[in-house]
Amino acid sequence: MKHIRILLLVAALVSTATAAGHGAPSSAPATPQAQPSQPLPTIASTADREISAIEKQIVEVAEAMPEEKFNFSPEGLNIPGSDYKGVRTFAVQLKHVAASNYFLWSPLTGEKIPENIKDGNGPAELKTKAEIIKFLKDSFALGHRAAATLTSENILQTPEHSKSSRLRLATFGVAHAYDHYGQMVEYLRMNGIVPPASRAKSD
Amino acid sequence: MKHLLVLTLLTVVATSAFAQSQSQDQAPLPARSRSDEMLDRWNAIGNKLVAMAQDFPEDKYDYKLQKDERTLALNLLHAAALDFVLIRAVAGSNIGPDFGEGDNPSRDAFKTKADVVKFVQEAVADGADVIKQQGDAGLDKTTKLGKKLHHNSDIWIFAIEHSAEHYGQLVVYYRANNMVPPDSRR
């Protein structure tokens, strides 16, 4: 996993070589690499990039797991000395990330949470790999719409139906997804599958 | 982790009733600064890693689930070391202990549980200090990493996300050792 850092630095910290953005002037010196033809990064574009980075990682992990393993839980391995009783299956991990995305990001857009999301584990009726990945992708599509609403003026404001700032809702969703991404990476390895982000690497 | 939803719903997606009663009965809360928000998030994930370092018995520090991955101790050292790499870049000074090149310190330099706990604690505390000292203005400054400049806010967010990923991996290590991870025992 040591190369994930490089991957993420490229994906998540890409090209903020311009001095403006984030709604406030930067005190850093103007950079010689700045390219006038590139749009300046904004709060919205930065949040969108973060969402894209974790979306790519999680969708790749989902696609890497064979459908017949979607109901895998470490509980079934009966590892001596372990206690995985009741932990989420791989499928429910994915649905939990997606459902949480809806709970966290809907307040930013004002969109109604889909009625089939009753709790944090997502719709029970979604069972196939294709259905679950679609649900996941749809939740990240909401994330992109949510990111687009962010401005330097509103990020510290609290949207309706929430007591957290827009900034926190936007960024917590990404960090929460990384937490579960880390768990799903372990689920893959428990099934002898090298996580996509670690493939073709020296480790 | 099954209680994380409840936690999330309670702490993040609050009911409108609270907001409404607050708006009727109290003056609006003052807007918190972006650096306050960043500091909260930095401390939240950092303190969870500290808790993990403290929780695990020393004789399990070299535990790993699969052969091709980091041990518990090396996960924690890596997360903290990357924090230090980024903190140093943002602060422009060589904060923290010497742990060699890169972001994968050897156990040779951190032999005991106490060494690892101290290293993780220092990373969290030192990062928090820099965020506080630099404030919102610091978030808007840029820092060169490699050949590119990055907004400091992006660098802090990256560090938080990176720690969250390793926290998630270690959650699975916890359960493998019949232990309950920090987020699930509140």
Image: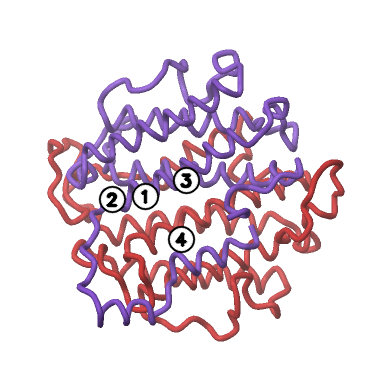
Colour that chain B carries in the picture: purple
> In this picture, is B94 found above or below B168?
above
Question: According to the image, label 1 marks what residue?
Answer: B40
> In this picture, is B83 found above or below A92?
above
* The quarter of the displayed image where residue A71 is located: bottom right
Which residue lies at the image location 25% right of the left edge and 26% below the top edge? B92
Spatial CA distance of label 2 from label 3 is 15 Å
Question: According to the image, label 3 marks what residue?
Answer: B45
Chain on which label 2 sits: B
Question: According to the image, label 4 marks what residue?
Answer: A173
Tell me where residue B142 appears, x and y as whole percent. 23, 39
Tell me where residue A20 appears, x and y as whole percent. 16, 49
Spatial CA distance of label 2 from label 4 is 18 Å
Could you tell me the amino acid type at mark 3?
A: Ile
Work out whether disc 2 and disc 4 sit on a shared chain: no
Q: Would you say the residues marked 3 and 1 are in contact, meaning their CB atoms lie under 8 Å apart?
A: no
Colour that chain A carries in the picture: red
Could you tell me the amino acid type at mark 4?
A: Gly
Q: Earlier in the sequence, mark 3 or mark 1?
A: 1
Spatial CA distance of label 3 from label 1 is 9 Å
Q: Residues within 10 Å of mark 2 (few under 14, many from 20)?
A: some
Question: According to the image, label 2 marks what residue?
Answer: B36
Tell me where residue A175 appears, x and y as whole percent. 47, 53
